[in-house]
Image (cartoon, grey):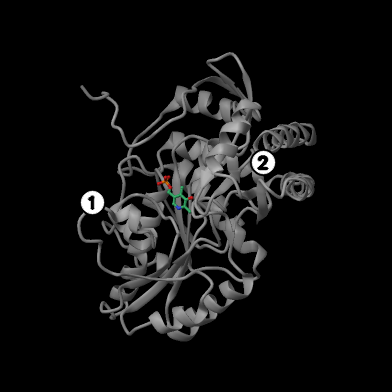
Amino acid sequence: MISPLLSNYAPADLSFEKGEGAYLIGNDGRRYLDFYAGIAVTSLGHAHPRVVKAIQDQAEKVLHVANLFRIPEQEELARKLVDATFADAVYFCNSGAEANECGLKMIRKYFSANGQPEKFRVIGFNDSFHGRTLATIAAAGQEKLLEGFGPAADGYDHVEAGDLEAVKAAITPETAGIIIEPIIGEGGIRVMDPDFLKSLRDLCDENDLLLMFDEIQTGMGRTGKLFAYEHLGFHPDIMSSAKALGNGFPVGACLAVEKVAKCMTVGSHGSTYGGNPMAMTVASTVVDVMTEEGFMDHVSRIANHLKQSLNGVVDRYPSVLEELRGVGLHLGLKCKVENSALIAALQKQGALTAKAGDNVVRLLPPLIIEEQQINEFINALENACEELSQ
Ligand SMILES: *Cc1c(COP(=O)(O)O)cnc(C)c1O
């Protein structure tokens, strides 16, 4: 007999009754410091009063109407995101993978609508992650995501992240765009060199290609800006967002500049749930909180404190930790021991973290984290390192 639940995950034997800010209360009665935030999702912490209120109020009005009718909450959130970013228009969906699907479809549609349907290929990067749909596993350069699922969807080429010459060599008359995470997240918190990203922007401009950033993990304040591209001084043509956008309520968004967005004509794409009043109200509240004066200053300040403290631990335990990576509160500890051993040792100390590729432990605390909770985490990390260095 198999479990009635599909066996595609291997969860730790722990569940949670409730959450409060940066803490999760386990069914074992323990209070855990949440340093993974549901994989960069609950960035405002658990049970944030404004998010709770928004959900309660909207639940009493209307949850869903489908896109057969105007959805004012959708128009309002689209306006907020357009005002806060480079984008001119936004499409709403329910997850990160769907947001990327929309972006990848838009790249093709743009060239098709402009009389160049032969341009449809997209260059992606080794060890990136864009979701689990057939197109997004083909776009990411990871064999293990494709295994067992038949021939990979056509139209994706891969090169090593950071290798500009390889990108140039991969461009053909069929190339339509480039998709990249400005910081490779699942693949091990690998921060892309800003010069490399700028070169991609230039290459796209010179070769008439579209540049798409997957900001599903880096976006919504994680790096100390609303989106990571804001650190760079230029912007992509298309950008996906999800994860922290709904603080736990499923929602995704694909943002684009006008010339791309206007190719998505009536009937070209859609979603039944996408952009429903409940999802929009929650995401709108998250955007409001994050764009309030002082919010990102707090993220940058607290991130500096965390980084400094973490670097101290890395220096003190060279047999356990190799280096600290990341920007803002999008951090990773590259380990010398097995990353899963450090995660287990941290859990014993009451701190929850997440695994990433390249033997990295991801540290993704909620953005509302305070200094005292950081000190608590550092204490847990010291104890875990002490145990592992014996
Ligand atoms: C999580 C993630 C996705 C996929 O999002 P889902 O909501 O799981 O579909 C895509 N890209 C990046 C960079 C992510 O971190």
Of 112 and 142, which appears nearest the observer? 142
Q: Quadrant of the N terminus?
A: top left
Looking at the image, is 386 positioned above or below residue 179?
Answer: above
Residue under pointer 2: 367
Residue extending farthest to the front is 390
- Residue at left offset 39%, top offset 81%: 171
Residue 384 tag number: none
**Circle 1 SS class:** loop
Q: Residue at x 75, y 45 (%)?
A: 313
Percent position (x, y) of residue 122? 36, 71
| Numbered disc 2: secondary structure | loop
Q: Amino acid at mark 2?
A: Leu
190 is higher (above) or lower (below) than 372 = below
> Is residue 175 rendered to the left or right of residue 337?
left
On the image, the x and y values in percent for residue 351 come to 64, 31
Q: Work out which quarter of the rendered image holds the C terminus and state it.
A: top right
Residue 191: x and y in percent read 60, 61
Label 2 Cα neighbours within 10 Å, binned few <14 / some 14-19 / many ≥20: many
The answer to whether residue 196 of the structure is visible from this angle is yes
**Which residue does the image show at 77% across and 50% down from the upper left?**
315
Q: Which residue does the numbered mark 1 point to in the structure image?
A: 148
Picture quadrant where residue 364 is located:
top right
Circle 1: residue type = Gly
Mark earlier in primary sequence (2, 1): 1
